Image: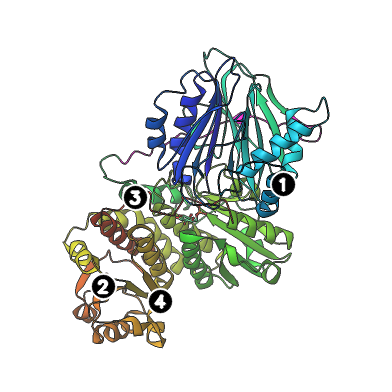
Amino acid sequence: MCGIFGCLGADAAAGVLNGLRKLEYRGYDSAGLAAIFPEHEGPIETERTTGYVADLVSKANGRFDGAEISIGHTRWATHGGVTDSNAHPHSSNDGKITIVHNGIIENAQELLERVENLGYDVQSETDSELIVHLLDHELNTQPVGRTPLEAFKSTISLLKGSWAVAVIMTGMDGILIARKGAPLVLGRGSGSGTCSYQGNCSHLCVSSDVQPFYGSCSEVAYLDDDDIFYISKNGIEGLEDSPIPEFEVLEGVYEEGDSGIFPHMMLKEIHDQPIALTNVLGGRISADGTRAELGGFKLSPKQMRGLDRINLVACGTAYYAALVGANYIRQLTELTVEAFRASEFPASDVCGPNTLTIAISQSGETKDTLDALQEARKNGSEISSFCNVIGSTIARMTGNGAYLYAGAEFAVASTKAFTNMTAALLLLALTISEIPDKQRKKIVREIRSLPAMVSRQLIEEDGSMESAIEILDGAKSAIFIGRGISAPLVLEGALKMMEVAYLPCLAYPGGELKHGPIALIEEGTPVIAVAPHDSTLPLMESSIRECRTRGAKIILITDHEGPITQFADVIIQTQATGTIVSPMVNVVPLQLLAYHLADQKGLNVDRPRNLAKSVTVV
Ligand code: BG6
């Protein structure tokens, strides 16, 4: 997934560099921009570099000041290595047409042969560059009187796959834009800029998401799939069949990715969890504190109880939250429920008129999850979603569900969004459930005490974390084990360790280890065991013994102080929770283990290699 940004107005290039900085979580392999100055004639000025937007800013070194039309890109490489020549923007051979693209062109091979047969000199390994040559050809061979927008439309009609594209051209005082399967939004801002745009706005921008608009734009318009427009001083121009998108007031505020007193955004976001939990619970627990009331869904709790099944679809960390959530719905209702990796969702087998498919996504933009939802809808399922980003594509597509209110999450490795997803899924299970009042009140009491419990967990400082890091630092791999509600949780623990500390990890239900993976244990192999004081504790004790017997170093995460502790090399004491909410407390030491090991290794904790905050390509 990449981030694209374009701007029309005074100092457009500065607007683009600022926009790219706020889109960098979408990909940080390379960055680039292009700009057109007033009265511009020759090839378009461009600059690009591997690395971060900050590297681009220093390389640009003010060369683009004064430009009034500019587009830019921050890349997460899919086609072609991380090189300067594969960085966007890509220009036509004469340099007079320049494009940026987010998405994947699936018929790239066929199009490559086409542009090479047309005699174009292809400079990069990317699928994106092909678009500029195809457009150049369309423009040079088009019948008299056809506009660049029409030539752009026929260029787009040659593509298969997903795209959000922005194009600038010498002699054209606007930006051509198109989207299909990758997000694109317009923003406009009022103010006293020199040039005025539609609605007396000082500038008009296009972006992969609304984040960069906060603080500079006051209105936003969302583009839909297959939209193709030309934006300029005169506003938004479409072709006969496409309705012009409506601007609406931009809600929300931009939370600057400022880690404050913390050295990294990831650590700051781990410490945000008590507040985040308070926000997701806010207004969703009845005034008398006895019931959970999660509103916002199209189906009522009664209708949900009558469903044949509920499917949860998600990717990455959100998938592990879905696994914990499925456990909650199974425990508290009679419903058939299953969590699926969105990229492996068997929609035709598990969807139908009396089913509900709920997407779970922090960004609300993950393509695999979006596609799973579309398949669910195609197969007759009702659809809903849990999203953190307000106004995201998944939230707008489902039109019902609940926001997670975790606040903006900047670190690529998701932390507070996981905890809020899990809490929201427990609220949903309780809202649907018909369990006896006594049991319900007990669970609601536990949920309400979560923010305080997590706060206490965060201030735990007994040196156990350092001792655990000593065991992990230098290890070749690690194994995570848990049972019951902790079995899906340790999958999230292992993911965090792999995402930020690059330590190969396996996560297994404690009882399953002896049926194979235990073969990996040798003297000193770290085994991280999550063993809350619930019905699985005695079973976890035997799993830990089996590992210890083969020389494993046991890092035990538990609220129990009994016999199980004697088998541990390090004990990370957790807050005593009841059973059902333990994942939202026990995830904290798992997040901190990954964070501290990555920090100890001097790795880029917030921008791990090869990752992006959410991936809008398949
Ligand atoms: C990956 C992120 O790209 O997408 C993970 O690196 C995230 O942190 C996953 O869990 C799913 O993203 P989302 O936004 O759909 O929850």
| Label 2 CB less than 8 angstroms from ligand 1 | no
Decide which of tag 1 and tag 3 comes sooner along the chain. Answer: 1
Classify mark 4: helix, strand or loop.
strand
Magenta region, residue range: 238-259
In the picture of the structure, the residue carrying the numbered disc 4 is 508
Which residue is drawn at the image coordinates 32% and 60% (left, top)? Answer: 501
- Residue 82 in percent (x, y) is at 46, 49
Question: Nearer the observer, disc 4 or disc 1?
Answer: 1
- Residue 446 in percent (x, y) is at 37, 61
Up/down of 10 relative to 260, above or below: above
Q: Amino acid at mark 2?
A: Leu
Neighbor class of circle 1 (other Cα within 10 Å; few <14, some 14-19, many 20+) is few
Cα separation between marks 4 and 2: 15 Å
Main SS, magenta region, reads loop
Decide which of tag 3 and tag 2 comes sooner along the chain. Answer: 3
Decide which of tag 4 and tag 2 comes sooner along the chain. Answer: 4
Classify mark 3: helix, strand or loop.
helix
Cα separation between marks 2 and 1: 63 Å
Neighbor class of circle 2 (other Cα within 10 Å; few <14, some 14-19, many 20+) is many
| Label 3 CB less than 8 angstroms from ligand 1 | no
Cα separation between marks 4 and 3: 25 Å
Q: Which label sits on residue 266?
A: 3
Neighbor class of circle 3 (other Cα within 10 Å; few <14, some 14-19, many 20+) is many
Q: Which label sits on residue 556?
A: 2
Cα separation between marks 1 and 3: 49 Å
In the picture of the structure, the residue carrying the numbered disc 1 is 117
Up/down of 356 relative to 402, above or below: below
